[in-house]
Image (cartoon, rainbow, N blue to C red):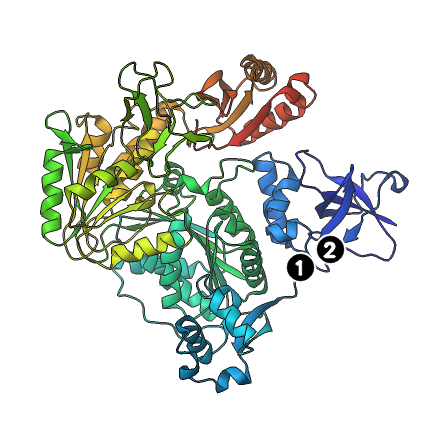
Amino acid sequence: MSVIRVALPVPLRQSFDYRLPVGIEVQVGCRVLVPFGKRELVGIVWQLQPADAFAEDALKSIVAVLDDSPVLSGQLCRLLSFAADYYHHPLGEVLISAIPALLREGKPLPGYQSLHYQLTQAGQAVTETDLQRAPKQLALWQQLRQGGLAADSITSEQRPALRALLQKQLVAAIEVPFSPYPAVTSTQAGLKLTTDQALAVSAIVQAQGRFQPFLLEGITGSGKTEVYLQSIAPLLAEGKQVLVLVPEIGLTPQTLARFADRFQVPVLSWHSGLTDTERLACWQQAATGSAAIVIGTRSALFLRFASLGLIVIDEEHDASLKQQDGFRYHARDLAVKRAALEQCPVVLGSATPSLESLYNALHKRFQLLTLSSRASGQQLPTLELVNLQQQAVQFGLADSSIQQIKHTLQQGFQVMLFLNRRGFAPALSCDECGWVADCQRCDASMTWHKQDRQLNCHHCGSSRPVPRQCGHCGSTRLVPLGQGTEQLEAQLQPMFPEVPVVRLDRDSTRRKGSLVEALQHITAGGPQLIVGTQMLAKGHHFPKVTLVVIVDVDGALFSSDFRAPEQLAQLITQVAGRAGRAQHAGKVLLQSRYPDHGILQDIIHNGYDSFARLALKERQQTLLPPYQYLALFRAESHQDDAPRQWLQQLVELAQTEAPKVQLLGPIRAPLERKAGKYRWQLHCYSASRAGLHQLLNQLIAASQSWPLTRKLRWQLDVDPVDLS
């Protein structure tokens, strides 16, 4: 008998010892099935024969060893151990989150092979005439005749045709072993580089084989993707793999297409829209080296790679790279740590770099690479403030904005209208008594989604049918307050009846494949009105868009969050960057009731580069991140006073243990009640990262024994990007 220490997916900050029966061997990083209370859980072997193990006769025996070899490599184990310590999250939950869902459930790891479809002898003997009455089967048969198709390349539209061909025994399924992709000896020629691009590519290529973080600061349209592509080419010739992180699923299809067009190698995607089976196949191909390039959202960071040669984080400033619940990690920061462990370069790219990354570059922790001009030679769009207080406004658009929209459409170009509120209206109100349809579980109004005939809360997710009468006086005169993308779309259609209106937001792209269809429709050309939320701001290339209208820029001007000015400047710059990306000049209209506000004036006249460096000086003067380190405790309960009392206990302990750590709180959260629970916060600031984390460990350990801890929910967010 021997003892192993197992990390389990439970909210306890400890691992558990189990007996390993005689004759059974296991390695660190393998999955095991173990008894835990009345349940059986899948855990990860974390340590063999720990020196401080319990006596064997006091331990339960494992139920089964699920893997012959580790599912988590040594490098990944080190990364995940660091992440669990840094973000103060239970190790078992961190480890188990890094493997695909099917493996978390204890399903056996399939052999390292993939499923392919190919024509049988009968299928090869068939002619086009035999299948002419079934056009979808004919189209798939023609594809298969040119060579086999991988199962994960079959689209949902093709599956009925595939089933029919399988039933007719014209097609057979075969298993093909995964193997490392063959090194690329030639690739499609890249674009001609500008001087800045060439210098950036040269620096990244020279760093291959060692750890070196780069910040690629390039204005919108400066050709950052081309820098990525030409930096990757030498790696593919050596059989190395590349990980490209993008902030959202919306960027994955176009990025995937561009990489696949350039390189004749397996390019895979990883995001939440994949099925569990598709995610497992991607995980296996990355682990075996069969995948050359993986393009994915933040969780792709934890994929196992056979030979990782480069990590790229596109739009590194984006808040979507930070997980906002559960294991609250930041993919950008952990990507830098992983690159250090893998001894490979990491490139953080953005037109509007985060102040944290810019701080690291200015202090020589990152090497700064700058792209100061657009790759096409086209000038940046001109920015113009539109004062909403000095002219008539129709449907949220000033008269001068409407005239410029008409002029742009008449010239045959496209117009983008950005409004960062989805739904028809942010609130529904009674026109007689002023009653507002509020969420019964949150301190917020419910958003009217007219198309779905629902009132939805965008905070807790609850919904209810639109009422016919006022909830206070019974009046039927219910009117929308404010404006959302759904309403703007409905108002634009009769105003411009001859022009298609395309809406891009989370509601309009829920159906699988709808986002790709919308993007294809936009890039097909012709006059169009494109209405959307933040989905429009992130890296899309619309060559026919020459006018961008930011319908309302005032939302973040008076926020209590110290990051709000930075996020507003990034949003304005990113949205503005969608205009004039081809040979035609672009223009951006910023509609505001406060056109003289200092932030707007600075962005318009000096650009993001100047704004960011000034903002860093302000952060330094006010001792805010990145000049101090920040951790945020959140506590919530159905009783209003319990979270405040619990946080006050933390304050009293912190003042004794670490008087140099500055505390702000307990204070109510900006959204005081969410999903029926009252919410309070405690901000912890420190000039010493080590001192802050030492205090956090002490606070967490002490709080476990407090009776009040069992009466509420609490979370710790290290390096938070959202203070709500």
Identify the amino acid type marked 1.
Leu
The residue lying at 14 percent from left, 24 percent from top is 389
Q: Position of residue 585 (x, y in %)?
A: 14, 51
Name the residue: 84% across, 38% down.
54
Instruction: Looking at the picture, tell me which residue is in the foreground, 654 or 324.
Output: 324
- Indicate left or right for 87 with 414 as reference: right
Label 2, label 1: how far apart the Cα atoms are: 8 Å
Circle 2 sits on which residue? 66
Number of the label disc, if any, that sits on residue 650: none
Residue 109 — which label? 1
Q: Where is residue 135 shown, x and y percent of the image?
A: 39, 73
Residue 253, picture quadrant: bottom left
Pick the quarter of the image with the C terminus.
Answer: top left
Hey, what amino acid is under mark 2? Leu
Residue 457 seen in the figure: no
Packing grade of label 2 (10 A; few <14, some 14-19, many >=20) is many
Q: Are marks 2 and 1 in contact (CB under 8 Å)?
A: yes
